[in-house]
Image (spheres, rainbow, N blue to C red):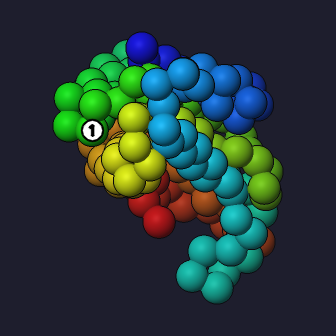
Amino acid sequence: MIDIKILDQTLDTDYCRSFVTHPSAGGIVVFVGTVRDQTQGKPVQKLEFEAFESMAIKEMAKIAEAIQEKWDAIHVAIHHRVGTLDISDIAVIIAVSTPHRKAAFEACQYAIDTLKETVPIWKKEFFDDGEVWVAAHP
């Protein structure tokens, strides 16, 4: 099963973990990406995320389907937040369950790396001296 969401409200790590829980899962990995207080040493006040939602959901589903195929994932949840986020808010949750732990780690890493490369989600960083739109890459 796959659960893909783009939400303008607080993301729920407990929900995502529960969604991927399964008796056949020997490994569950949950990645939680949060808003940090600096970028390249420059203090960040907040972030704003925007998405081309219909395309983003399609691309996120492709990632989840690839994970199921390559790593034999049982369940995959990918949730991303849009709107204004404060420091420490959760921007993205990726949860994966697989029969074995190594596959779960690899699948989760693939998911976040591919999401940042292919999914049309953009972020604006707000600083004391202005703001800038950047690709949603680290």
Query: Left or right: 6 with respect to 120?
Result: right
Furthest-bottom residue in this view = 41
75 vs 113, nearest the viewer: 75
14 vs 53, nearest the viewer: 14
* Label 1: few (<14), some (14–19) or many (≥20) C-alpha neighbours in 10 Å: many
Query: Left or right: 22 with respect to 89?
Result: left
- Look at mark 1 in the image and give the residue it sits on: 71
For image coordinates 35% across by 47% down, the residue present is 103
- Quadrant location of the N terminus? top left
Identify the image quadrant of residue 34.
Answer: bottom right
66 vs 79, nearest the viewer: 66
The location of residue 91, given as percent across then percent down, is 63, 44
For image coordinates 20% across by 37% down, the residue present is 70
Can you say whether 108 is above or below 52 in the image?
Answer: below
Can you say whether 107 is above or below 59 in the image?
Answer: below
Query: Left or right: 74 with respect to 66?
Result: right
The location of residue 21, given as percent across then percent down, is 59, 25
Mark 1 is on which residue type?
Trp
The location of residue 105, given as percent across then percent down, is 43, 52
Q: Secondary structure at mark 1?
A: helix
For image coordinates 46% across by 25% down, the residue present is 24
Can you say whether 65 is above or below 100 in the image?
Answer: above
